[in-house]
Image (spheres, helix red, strand yellow):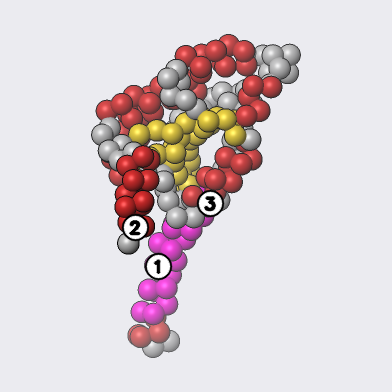
């Protein structure tokens, strides 16, 4: 084999892991998820998502979705994420919860009543929007094709308890955007 062919083959072999790393879902096992969240939030902006999910949440395959196993209490993770938002000026959280959660009976999911009450207190004043679980997953999957999604997986074993947070601009409101678009539409 010629020197050029060997060099070409070696180059291809070395590049395969680099290209493979960028394809498919990214997942991390338990680590310092708080540090990761603290470091990643300044990089995130409107249209990015952070999801705090229960232990059975699926590993999604969109390239932009990164999943981290926290091995932590679900509501502790939700509170930690909201605390990071409180320190941020560039983004604000828009909260989504599963519509199914309101209907999960205590008999089928022991602890769900206590969880609903605690989540309500945690999200007090934030006006979460309730949508069907599959609809929210579809939104994340679609967003993950273009934008980064951070999924923080918890130890919780109660269904339909995930909290999905779409990031919005912290210094520009929907009303300001509407006024801008109206002004631009005028001749």
Q: Are marks 2 and 3 in contact (CB under 8 Å)?
A: no
Q: Specify the segment rendered in magenta.
A: 7-25
> Is residue 18 located in the magenta-colored stretch of the structure?
yes
Residue occupying the point 36% across, 57% down? 185
Let me know if residue 152 appears in the view. no
Residue occupying the point 64% across, 21% down? 102
Identify the secondary structure beneath mark 3: helix
Q: Is residue 53 above or below residue 16?
A: above
Query: Which residue in the structure is indicated by mark 2?
Result: 186
Q: Are marks 3 and 1 in contact (CB under 8 Å)?
A: no
Q: Quadrant of residue 48?
A: top left
Closer to the camera in the image, 38 or 2: 38
Q: Residue 51 location in percent, x, y?
A: 48, 35
Residue 142, disc: 3
Residue occupying the point 38% across, 40% down? 174
Q: Is 65 on the left or on the right of 186, as rendered?
A: right
Q: Is 166 on the left or on the right of 102, as rendered?
A: left
Q: Nearer the viewer, mark 2 or mark 3?
A: 2
Q: Is 133 on the left or on the right of 6, as rendered?
A: right
Looking at marks 2 and 3 on the same chain, the residue that comes earlier in the sequence is marked by: 3
Q: Quadrant of the C terminus?
A: bottom left
Closer to the camera in the image, 89 or 175: 175
Looking at marks 1 and 2 on the same chain, the residue that comes earlier in the sequence is marked by: 1
For the residues labelled 1 and 2, the Cα–Cα distance comes to 52 Å
> Is residue 96 located in the magenta-colored stretch of the structure?
no
Residue 15, disc: 1
Identify the secondary structure beneath mark 2: loop
């Amino acid at each position: 084999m010629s020197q050029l062919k060997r060099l070409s083959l070696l180059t291809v072999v070395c590049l395969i892991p680099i290209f493979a790393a960028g394809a498919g879902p990214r997942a991390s096992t338990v680590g310092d998820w708080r540090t990761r969240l603290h470091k990643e939030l300044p990089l995130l902006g409107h249209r990015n998502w952070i999801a705090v999910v229960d232990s059975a949440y699926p590993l999604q395959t969109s390239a932009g979705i990164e999943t981290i196993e926290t091995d932590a209490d679900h509501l502790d993770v939700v509170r930690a994420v909201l605390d990071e938002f409180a320190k941020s000026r560039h983004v604000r959280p828009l909260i989504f919860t599963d519509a199914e959660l309101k209907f999960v009976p205590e008999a089928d999911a022991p602890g769900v009543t206590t969880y609903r009450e605690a989540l309500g207190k945690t999200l007090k004043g934030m006006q979460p929007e309730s949508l069907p679980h599959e609809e929210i997953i579809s939104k994340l999957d679609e967003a993950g094709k273009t934008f980064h999604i951070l999924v923080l997986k918890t130890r919780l074993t109660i269904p339909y308890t995930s909290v999905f947070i779409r990031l919005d601009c912290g210094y520009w409101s929907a009303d300001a955007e509407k006024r801008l678009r109206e002004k631009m539409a005028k001749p």
